[in-house]
Every structure is written in structure tokens, then in C-alpha cells.
Amino acid sequence: MNNLFLYKIFENPQLYGSWAVLIVFSVCCHELSHALAAKWLGDSTAADAGHITLNPLKQMGWTALILLLLLGITWGQVPVNPRRLTRKGFRVTVSLAGVLANFLLAVIFAIFAAIAIRADSHLLANFFTLGTLLNIILALFNLLPVPPLDGFAALREIFPHLDRFNTTEFGKGTMLFLFFAVFYFGVNFIYNAGLAAAESLITFIMVLFA
């Protein structure tokens, strides 16, 4: 998310609160989806560790929550044991489950945003529009094919040689460089793409149910 947007968030307490609540909820849903997908497909590692929950302390942890509030960055993670999945191809499904959850949340938030706009409730419309935007951004960001994001995890299953590349010191350094390069140069593009997608989705729903 670009610096201007973060600046506006930190300057507006109401927007800041809405943003923090939506991010925490969306990340927890993302991680819960990974855990559920893994359990359904044969790996109960995350379920056994207590990740079938929306508790942010379990899905994110104190460090991720504090950095979210202070710096606007955060993460979540659930343990997955690929060897326990009943089929090898299921690893792609587990990797992309969180992304699919964010896209689904974006649609749900967009529906509520359209209803709020129709009802002329500016406060709710802004909240649900922000929820739509944030979930599209989270989905797009996690689709990037760089570790430790879900896009790379899925790509690694399709091209197994990438896994070997990521185990060498040179490979780890290259992947780390790629992550920060993509984050630095691609964040504005992802934000603008997410904003356009969110506006289009809400407009489409409003027209669909006009």
C-alpha cells in the first residue's frame, strides 16, 4: 500500500481503527482457510496446533500485531506438512486457499458496500469499501511468485526445481532480494490495481442488483 494511503490512515483515527480491524480479520480468515484446506485434504498439522480459529494471537502473534499498528506491515502463518496431504497436487490447493478466501471476502464486502451506498450510509459504505479494497490487495500481493508468499508456494509445486533453488544460500539471497524488490517497486501498482478492481466490483454489484 502506498505511502500516501498509509499517511492518510495514521492521520485519521477512525480510518486507522477501521483499517486495523479489517486487516486483522482478513489475515486471520486467510490463515484459517489454509488450515481448513490442509485439514480437509489430509494434513491436520495446523488443526492440531489450534489454527482452526480467527484468534489473531494464534494466526498472527504479538509481533505481527504490534508491527501492524506501528508500521502498517503484518503477516500470518500456519504450519503445513505436505507429506501428510493425500495427493501431491493438493499442495497447490492449500497454498491458494488463503488467496481464494480474500477474493471471497472482497465480494462479500463489496455486496455490503453496495447496500450501504444504496442506503446512503456513508460511514458503512466507506468501511465496507475499504474492506473490499484491502482484501483484493491482500489477494494480489499473496499471488506474487516470490517466497514466502502463496504464489511462490503454488508455483513451487508446479515447478519442483524452484524448491531446490530456494535451499541454497545463493538462492535464498536471490529470493530475498526479489521479495523486497517486488515489494518496493510493485506496491503502488498493486494498490492501484486493487483500487480499480474494488471500484469496478462494487459498481458491477450495484448495476447487477439495480
Image (cartoon, rainbow, N blue to C red):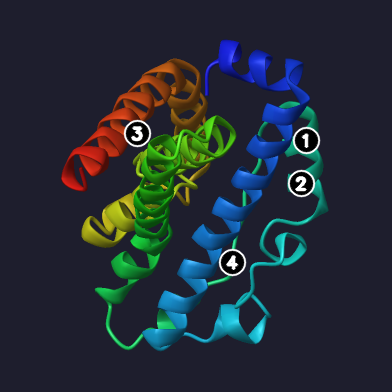
Q: Mark 1 belongs to which amino acid?
A: Leu
Q: Residue at x 73, y 46 (%)?
A: 64
Residue indicated by mark 3: 198
- Residue 202 in view of the camera: yes
Rendered image quadrant of residue 38 = bottom left
The C terminus lies in quadrant: top left
Residue 67, given in percent of the width and then of the height, sits at 77, 37
Rendered image quadrant of residue 70 = top right
Residue indicated by mark 4: 78
Give the mark nearest the N terminus, 3 or 2: 2
Q: Nearer the viewer, residue 89 or 194?
A: 194
* Disc 3 from disc 2: Cα separation: 25 Å
Q: Residue at x 57, y 53 (%)?
A: 27
Q: Is residue 4 left or right of residue 103?
A: right
Q: Mark 2 belongs to which amino acid?
A: Leu
Residue 169, given in percent of the width and then of the height, sits at 53, 41
Q: Residue at x 75, y 15 (%)?
A: 11
* Disc 4 from disc 1: Cα separation: 21 Å
Rendered image quadrant of residue 163 = bottom left
- Residue 142 in view of the camera: no
Give the mark nearest the N terminus, 2 or 4: 2
Q: Nearer the viewer, mark 2 or mark 4?
A: 2
Q: Nearer the viewer, residue 45 or 102?
A: 102
Q: Residue at x 67, y 80 (%)?
A: 49
